[in-house]
Amino acid sequence: MLGARVIAAASSEGKLAICRQYGADATINYVSEDLKERIKVFTNGQGVDVVVDPVGGPYSELALRGMAWNGRFLVIGFTSGDIPRIPLNLPLLKGCSIVGVFWGSFAIRDPQHHQENLRQLLGWLREGKLKPHISACYPLEQAADALNDITQRRVTGKAVLIV
């Protein structure tokens, strides 16, 4: 929506199909394909300018190795449960930045910019430009089932609890 060419990486063809449905220009199955090499192919050897990593785990380093000069690696979280240990020579060699993106802390520390961002996002939702993928809806009584489905990686988007 902001003009970026999006390369999405996921662990299954089903998840990649959803990525393409929601606008990904290219996809990589990081289980069956070499993440770093596929990044090179899709970027003509230049690497990516931005990595958005909410997962962590063993693929973070490979994604960082696929960065372009002066790129930004955004650390969003560690849903894999594994916090990667990144060799610090990589940012040096790539001239890139590793940036922590902690939404909760940002909202508290910079409420004005947080409100501006929220207005923009809600505007895009209202206009139908932003359409989050809702994977499943659960009644509140099944909140434990929702959490189990998330931890078992059966959720491919958002899980919604209905109150």
Image (cartoon, rainbow, N blue to C red):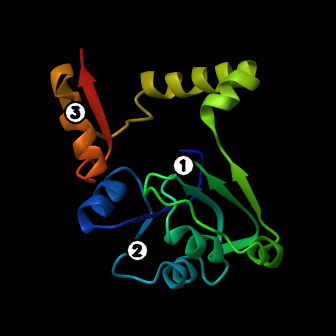
Query: What separation in Å lies between label 2 and label 3 (alpha carbons)?
Result: 29 Å
Disc 3 marks which residue?
Answer: 144
Can residue 98 be seen here? The reply is: yes
- The disc label shown at residue 30, or none: 2
Q: CA distance from mark 1 to mark 2?
A: 18 Å
Pointer 1 local density, CA inside 10 Å: few below 14, some 14–19, many at least 20: some
| Mark in the foreground, 2 or 3 | 3
The image quadrant that residue 2 belongs to is top right
Can residue 136 be seen in the rendering of this structure?
no
Residue 40 in the image: x percent, y percent?
A: 57, 82
Above or below — where is 99 with respect to 36? above
Whether residue 95 sits left or right of residue 102 in the image: it is right
* Residue most extreme to the top: 163
- As displayed, is residue 127 above or below residue 129? above
Query: With 99 as the anchor, is 64 left or right in this view?
Result: left
Q: Disc 1 or disc 2, which is closer to the eye?
A: 1
Residue beneath label 1, please?
77
- Sequence-wise, the earlier of marks 1 and 3 is 1
Residue at image location 25% in from the left, 53% down from the top: 152
Q: Give the residue at x 23% y 36%.
A: 146
